[in-house]
Amino acid sequence: GGSVATYSLSGKELVTLGATSNGGAIYVFNKTGEGIVSLEAGDYGNGEVGVWNRKGKGRVYGSQ
C-alpha cells in the first residue's frame, strides 16, 4: 500500500491517489478538507464512484 497526496497552500488535503485492499483509489477534497469525490474498486473489484455535498450527504454508484 501507499499513497500520494497534494495539498493547498493552507495545508488542506486536496487529492489523494493511493492503494486499497481492493485496488487503486482516488479521493478529492474541497477547499475546507471535506471529501467530495471518491473513485475506487469495491469489494468485488468493480468500479465505484462516490459523490458528497458539503453536508456529508451523498451516494456511491457502482457497477454490478
Image (spheres, helix red, strand yellow):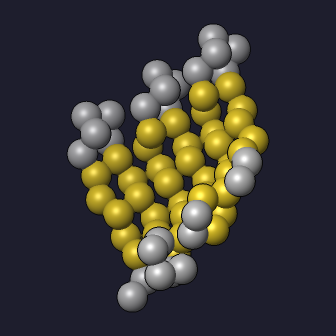
Q: Percent position (x, y) of residue 34?
A: 43, 32
- Closer-to-camera residue (19/16): 19
Seen as rendered, the residue at the extreme top is 10
Q: Percent position (x, y) of residue 40?
A: 55, 64
Relative horizontal placement of residue 4, taking residue 56 as reference (left or right): right
Q: In the picture, residue 6 is in which quadrant?
A: top right
* Quadrant that contains the C terminus: bottom left
Q: Percent position (x, y) of residue 37?
A: 47, 50
Look at the picture and state if 40 lies above or below 10.
below
Q: Residue at x 39, y 53 (%)?
A: 51
Q: Residue at x 45, y 74 (%)?
A: 43
- Closer-to-camera residue (45/31): 45
* Total numbered labels placed on residues in the image: 0
- Closer-to-camera residue (2/27): 2
Q: Residue at x 54, y 80 (%)?
A: 45
Q: In the picture, residue 25 is in which quadrant?
A: bottom right
Q: In the picture, residue 4 is in which quadrant?
A: top right
Relative horizontal placement of residue 25, taking residue 49 as reference (left or right): right
Look at the picture and state if 32 lies above or below 46.
above
Q: Residue at x 61, y 33 (%)?
A: 14
Relative horizontal placement of residue 44, taking residue 57 as reference (left or right): right
Look at the picture and state if 45 lies above or below 25.
below
Q: Percent position (x, y) of residue 54?
A: 32, 34
